[in-house]
Amino acid sequence: MNRVPMTVEGAEALRSELDNLKKVERPAVVEAIAEAREHGDLKENAEYHAAREKQGFIEGRIQEIEAKLSHSLVIDVKSIEPSDKVIFGTTVTIIHLDDDVEVTYKIVGDDEADVKKQKISVNSPIARALIGKEVGEIVVVHTPSGAVEYEIETVEHL
């Protein structure tokens, strides 16, 4: 079984969503199904079918989250001795060498990735190029439009 890396924050977010689905969403949809059943004929009852569909979605999402959490390897980067080396969970500031634009990314698990929040997947081309490198090194990232060079400015364990 492959273990999937995940940050502490990512695991907490999934646990929170799971808790909400089990304690709030699931009981609400069960109540909606019961209410729709009281309206009579189930064959032509749109409310009943919509509630059953929502119940299927909720149950599927619960199973998906439980599977992800059971296969996850939660890594707390704050508990690892800080160094200048880029590892999973670190926040890395890089400088694009062509135009000196500075960008900061946190390297996270696949499910946590959100470029708008400067969180990139450990499996993204940029993260794969950065992992294992140290501050001051030049990193070449291969993109569809060609190779792009970055210099690693800082590595933080936030």
Image (cartoon, grey):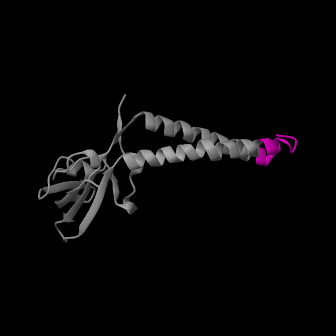
Residue drawn at (81%, 45%), measured in percent from left and top? 35
Q: Quadrant of residue 75?
A: top left
Viewer-nearest residue: 56 or 90: 90
Residue drawn at (54%, 43%), measured in percent from left and top? 18
Residue 110 vs 152, above or below: the answer is above
Viewer-nearest residue: 123 or 20: 20
Viewer-nearest residue: 11 or 109: 11
Residue 116: percent from left, percent from top: 39, 62
Residue 100: percent from left, percent from top: 19, 71
Residue drawn at (77%, 48%), measured in percent from left and top? 47
Residue 26 appears in view: yes
Judge left or right: residue 8 versus residue 59: left
Residue drawn at (24%, 45%), measured in percent from left and top? 80
Q: Is residue 46 found inside the magenta-colored segment of the image?
A: yes
Judge left or right: residue 71 versus residue 56: left
Judge left or right: residue 71 versus residue 156: right
Where is the N terminus found, in terms of image quarters? top left
The part of the chain drawn in magenta is 34-48
Q: Is residue 42 found inside the magenta-colored segment of the image?
A: yes
Where is the C terminus found, in terms of image quarters? bottom left
Residue 155: percent from left, percent from top: 21, 56
Residue 148 appears in view: no
Q: How many marks?
A: 0
Residue 99: percent from left, percent from top: 19, 71
